[in-house]
Image (cartoon, rainbow, N blue to C red):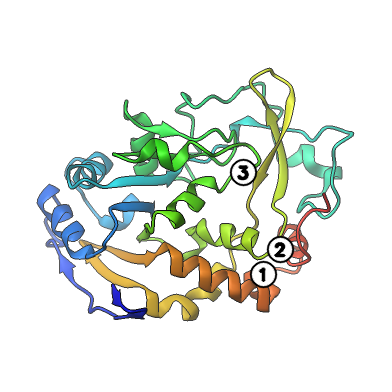
């Protein structure tokens, strides 16, 4: 990916014939072309972006595992969201408490790390496949959990908690891991939320039921619809590979975090989605909730 801090921009490599779709061998060729030093990756993905894949998401996940990788993926679920307690409603929290009940559910569910519930519409088939695997490890955050599978899966997610939501990303940073976007853009890169936290913003607070059934605070990220503004900043750090119809964009975690954190400190509006009615963006650029 780079030598002595200099990142080389690699040419796009096409793998797999589009008309016939992809098989396991095509995925393995793509993995071989990644050329990364660490075999710890956070994957954000769209299975549809590949076109047809023989065996679907399972083929992709197993190919990485068979090559010795540990995969981290977001496995978010709002099924566990509850209404904010009347005595715990921070100001500047990216929501309107007056119409909160119109937008969110009255959940009676209690999250555990054994749960296989995931937001199927916003998450892709790949994290859902990981979540179904018997040897995976899911972090303890009722709304924004991360799940990992592979040799270092426990290490990646063991420190996640309702408040320390981005502990798996912090561990990915410490382990010099990588982010792979498969057919999706920067609006899906959760690591930028971690950069927001490092830049000094308070994360938004939502609520779920704890293991005892009582309401607990849960930290979550901001609006991500403005994150493509980071494209010019990150373009020299990424490697691009075509795997079938899916564009894989590979980023070194440390450089992403350092560049994005610095950019947010210098220009708070860089994360703003551009919608002046977006409560989350408006409150985020002011520093997040007053705690």
Q: Earlier in the sequence, mark 3 or mark 2?
A: 3
Q: Can you tell which of label 3 and label 1 is closer to the viewer?
A: 3
- Between marks 3 and 2, how big is the CA–CA gap? 21 Å
At numbered mark 3, what does the secondary structure look like: helix, strand or loop?
loop
Residue at position x 83%, y 53% from top? Answer: 290
Lateral position of residue 141 relative to residue 255, left or right: right
Choose between 262 and 97: the one closer to the eye.
Answer: 262
| 24 to 237, vertically: above or below | above
At numbered mark 1, what does the secondary structure look like: helix, strand or loop?
loop
Lateral position of residue 14 relative to residue 223, left or right: left
Q: Earlier in the sequence, mark 3 or mark 1?
A: 3
Q: Which residue is mark 2?
A: 281
- Between marks 2 and 1, how big is the CA–CA gap? 5 Å
Q: Residues within 10 Å of mark 2 (few under 14, many from 20)?
A: many
How many numbered discs? 3
Q: Is residue 101 visible?
A: yes
Q: Which residue is mark 1?
A: 272
Lateral position of residue 138 relative to residue 212, left or right: left
Q: Which residue is mark 3?
A: 164
Decide: marks 3, 2 in contact (CB < 8 A)?
no
Lateral position of residue 179 relative to residue 20, left or right: right
Considering the image in quadrants, where does the N terminus appear? bottom left
> What percent of the width, then of the height, locates residue 108?
67, 21
Decide: marks 2, 1 in contact (CB < 8 A)?
yes
Residue at position x 45%, y 55% from top? Answer: 174
């Amino acid at each position: 990916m780079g030598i002595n801090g200099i990142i080389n921009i690699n040419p796009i490599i096409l793998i797999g014939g589009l008309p016939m779709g992809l098989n396991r061998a095509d995925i393995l060729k793509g993995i071989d072309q990644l050329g990364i030093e660490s075999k710890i990756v956070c994957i954000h993905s769209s299975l549809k972006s590949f076109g047809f894949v023989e065996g679907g998401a399972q083929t992709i996940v197993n190919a990485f595992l068979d090559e010795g990788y540990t995969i981290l993926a977001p496995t978010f679920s709002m099924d566990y969201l509850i209404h904010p307690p009347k005595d715990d409603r921070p100001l500047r929290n990216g929501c309107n408490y007056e119409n909160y009940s119109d937008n969110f559910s009255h959940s009676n569910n209690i999250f555990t790390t054994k749960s296989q519930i995931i937001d199927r519409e916003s998450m892709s088939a790949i994290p859902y496949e990981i979540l179904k695997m018997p040897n995976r490890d899911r972090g303890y955050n009722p709304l924004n959990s991360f799940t990992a599978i592979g040799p270092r899966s426990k290490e990646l997610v063991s420190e996640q908690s309702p408040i320390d939501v981005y502990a798996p990303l912090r561990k990915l940073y410490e382990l010099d891991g990588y982010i792979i976007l498969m057919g999706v853009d920067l609006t899906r890169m959760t690591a930028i939320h971690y950069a927001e936290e490092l830049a000094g913003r308070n994360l938004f607070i939502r609520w779920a039921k704890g293991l005892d059934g009582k309401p607990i605070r849960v930290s979550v990220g901001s609006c991500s619809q403005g994150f493509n503004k980071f494209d010019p900043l990150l373009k020299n750090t990424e490697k691009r590979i075509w795997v079938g119809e899916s564009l894989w964009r590979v980023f070194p975690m440390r450089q992403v975090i350092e560049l994005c954190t610095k950019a947010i400190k210098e220009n708070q509006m860089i994360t703003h989605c551009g919608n002046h009615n977006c409560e989350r963006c408006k409150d985020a650029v002011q520093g997040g909730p007053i705690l």
